[in-house]
Image (spheres, helix red, strand yellow):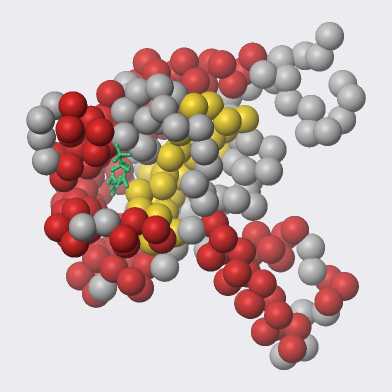
Amino acid sequence: MAKNNNKFPKNVGIIMDGNGRWALKNSLQVSQGHKKGVDTVREIVEVSVEKKIKSLTLYAFSSENWQRPKSEINAIKNLVIDAINDQVPELKEQRVQLKFFGHLEEFGNKVINKIKYAESETNFEDPKLNLNIALSYGGQQDILDIVKGIAADVLDKKINLKDIDQKIISEFSCAPVESIDLLIRTGGDKRVSNFLLYQIAYAEIMFIDKFWPDFKKTDFIECLNNFKKVSRRFGKRL
Ligand code: FPP
């Protein structure tokens, strides 16, 4: 019989879905749902540090989220700024390195400057956890950007066509993680929604039937323990 993997994942990705429905269920504004969602982020980061997870990559805002009402978009922008202001001292204490990725330029200078501040404040040589936040990110857009970037370098003769490999693809991706071991999606829907399409090739995927603000430390630990029980074969016969 194939052996259990028996290890915690190195690289975890999370699609934090269900803030809006959580707010509706509790007769609150959608922005209150997102605010509550940040509390869950803090809890999940704490567990990730405790369990020595190498990286945690969170889908905070997709390329498609720009189609939401302006008021909600503004609330999320302010939330990112507030979360950075509130959380950076604690993240520094825990030696968590923050990185943001995606088409960040679309968020404007105020958010960009805050992101730069957060990244420089947490730029550890030997971080305990890499916390990556996807903002204005879409996996298909990333693949398009990768192709254009590599093609331009081939035309400029900086890269030989025969040298293009998976490492080069990862280097050209805006995502600071090469491969995801465990992908969690809360909120009950069973889809990937354009998140890290290239990097989730061999990810174990867990769909959780709870809204993101209701996802607790114990739920996350249960996911990590379930991951240990999986037999990961990567196409091989074990
Ligand atoms: C999905 O719920 C959640 C979002 C689109 C935003 C998540 C953003 C945060 C929790 C803020 C993160 C900020 C930092 C700095 C970590 P939804 O609104 O799509 O939920 P619904 O499907 O119920 O409507």
Asked if residue 129 can be seen in this view, the reply is: no
Quarter that holds the N terminus: top right
Q: Is residue 170 left or right of residue 31?
A: right
Q: Is residue 143 left or right of residue 116?
A: right
Quarter that holds the C terminus: top right
How many discs mark residues in the rendered view? 0
Out of 202 and 97, give the one closest to the viewer: 202
Q: Is residue 34 left or right of residue 59?
A: left
Query: Residue 74 location in percent, x, y?
Result: 17, 60
When asked about the image quadrant of residue 152, the answer is: bottom right
Q: Quadrant of ligand 1?
A: top left
Asked if residue 115 can be seen in this view, the reply is: yes
Q: Residue at x 35, y 49 (%)?
A: 60
Q: Among all residues in the image, which is located at the extreme top?
A: 1
Query: Residue 77 location in percent, x, y?
Result: 21, 58
When asked about the image quadrant of residue 216, the answer is: top left
Query: Residue 217 location in percent, x, y?
Result: 35, 21
Is residue 77 shown above or below 158?
above
Q: Residue at x 53, y 26 (%)?
A: 206
Out of 218 and 36, give the one closest to the viewer: 36
Is residue 209 shown above or below 184?
above
Is residue 68 shown above or below 153?
above
Q: Residue at x 53, y 42 (%)?
A: 192
Q: Residue at x 58, y 71 (%)?
A: 145
Query: Residue 35 location in percent, x, y?
Result: 18, 41
Out of 164 and 62, give the one closest to the viewer: 62
Is residue 37 shown above or below 221?
below
